[in-house]
Image (cartoon, helix red, strand yellow):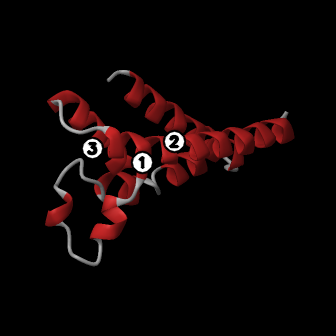
Amino acid sequence: FLVVPIIFAAVVALAMGLIGYRASSPDAAASLASIPYLPFVMLSSGFAPVADFPAWLRPFVRNQPTTHTIELLRALSSGGPTRSHAVAFVAWMVPLGLGLALLGGRAFRRTS
């Protein structure tokens, strides 16, 4: 149960690090870092069930990494089925983590 949020936080930290390296100033980095907040936090199943969103928005809400992370944590804590949530979580986190690590490493080398 604790590994899931740690992995999610690590991927988010990689994304924020990349934004920080790419930004022209700390103020710009803070502004850019707030952009993903709406689509990836507010439009997830963390605050409301997927069924409560408008029909045209449900596919996005249902198939994004934050929702899969939340649903996996809910399934783990309630003893519900975890296989589909775990597969979706890994399918998002592994490519995102690797891609962000590569891009962040490249950005770090350019700024050093």
The answer to the question of whether label 2 and label 3 lie on touching residues, with beta carbons closer than 8 A, is no
Residue depicted at x 67% and y 46%: 99
Q: Residues within 10 Å of mark 1 (few under 14, many from 20)?
A: some
Amino acid at the residue labelled 3: Glu
Q: In the rendered view, does 3 fall on the left or right side of 53?
A: right
User: Is 61 placed above or below 37 here?
Assistant: below
Mark 2: secondary structure? helix
Closer to the chain start, of discs 1 and 2, is 1
- x%, y% of residue 55? 22, 76
Amino acid at the residue labelled 2: Met
Residue depicted at x 68% and y 38%: 101
Mark 3: secondary structure? helix
- x%, y% of residue 86? 38, 39
Amino acid at the residue labelled 1: Ala
Of the 4 image quadrants, the one containing the C terminus is: top right
The answer to the question of whether label 1 and label 3 lie on touching residues, with beta carbons closer than 8 A, is yes
- x%, y% of residue 35? 47, 57
Per the image, the residue denoted by label 2 is 93
